[in-house]
Amino acid sequence: MGEEASCDAVSLTEAGTNAKPVGKEVGREPAAAPAAAADPRLQGISDAIRVVPHFPKQGIMFNDITTLLLRPRVFKDAVDLFVERYRGMGIDAVAGIEARGFVFGPAIALAIGAKFIPLRKPRKLPESCADTGSRKQLLLLLLEGEVISEKYVLEYGTDCLEMRVGAIERSGERVLVIDDLVATGGTLCAAIRLLERAGADVVECACVIGLPKFKDLYKLNGKPVYVLVESRE
Ligand SMILES: O=P(O)(O)OC[C@H]1O[C@H](OP(=O)(O)OP(=O)(O)O)[C@H](O)[C@@H]1O
Ligand SMILES: Nc1ncnc2[nH]cnc12
């Protein structure tokens, strides 16, 4: 198992406001100027996201990606931008966060030749249960099917993510975490903690959208977050 992650989402009271660059890492300085920064596909992606005020709670500007999904050209552009960045980086697995990370993660995983690991909301993953076979077979089955959980706080509530430990098949597998959006970073923190507990090496987190008011405020155990566009709120 990996070391305990030092991972903190921001508290909502720390949030300020910020500008709106695109196609870049947040949460740590990029090693080089982002190649995607001037990519014309980014404007189309930004334009295709609907911003809904006061959903699901008063004061939240909700970034809705379902409008982007209705435009296949733009949807493909978003997937392609990630594929172009991560192809050839020796990524073994793409871990997608339920639910919206499941929309982008599998397409990216298939295109870069990686396996897909679903990080699920509570009580969706079956734990192994066996009443036949040898003691050794039973033990292996239970270990392989073990499900681990991490609770977290996000922009508008609390939740929990779960993963099957056996999805990481050898220590040090290189994993990319995918979601549609990073706000406080609470969800990504929980994802990193789960993967590291299972022995993975989390290379980077990648989201279509970043909320600028939270960037630079969260610590994700030193892991960078790459976002395509910043919210227009
Ligand atoms: O950075 P954070 O403050 O943690 O927030 C980001 C998370 O919030 C949204 O998911 P949500 O929990 O609403 O779940 P859903 O995708 O099932 O709607 C979004 O898809 C991210 O997973
Ligand atoms: N503002 C927001 N829009 C969409 N999803 C979110 N998850 C957390 N904050 C969000």
Image (cartoon, helix red, strand yellow):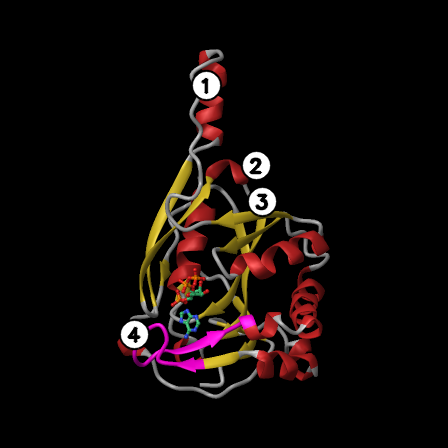
Of tags 1 and 3, the one toward the viewer is 1
Q: Secondary structure at mark 1?
A: helix
Residue 216 at least partly seen: yes
Q: CA distance from mark 3 to mark 4?
A: 33 Å
100 shown above or below 28 = above
Of the pair 110 and 176, the residue shown nearer to us: 110
Q: Is residue 41 left or right of residue 228?
A: right
Of the pair 72 and 41, the residue shown nearer to us: 72
Q: Which mark is residue 62?
A: none
Amino acid of disc 1: Leu
Q: Which mark is residue 12?
A: 4
Q: Percent position (x, y) of residue 11?
A: 29, 71
Q: Which of the two labelled residues, at mark 1 and mark 4, occupies the earlier sequence position?
A: 4
Residue visible at 46% across and 18% down? 138
Q: Which of the two labelled residues, at mark 2 and mark 4, occupies the earlier sequence position?
A: 4
Residue 2 at least partly seen: no
Q: Secondary structure at mark 2?
A: loop
Amino acid of disc 4: Leu
Indicate the quadrant containing the C terminus: top left, top right, bottom left or bottom right.
bottom left
Q: Percent position (x, y) of residue 50?
A: 51, 80
Please name the residue that numbered disc 1 is placed on.
138
CB atoms of marks 3 and 2 within 8 Å: yes
23 shown above or below 179 = below
Whether the residue carrying mark 2 lies under 8 Å from ligand 1 is answered with no
Range covered by the magenta-colored residues: 52-66
Q: Percent position (x, y) of residue 206?
A: 55, 65
Quarter of the rendering containing residue 212:
bottom left
Q: Which mark is residue 173?
A: 3
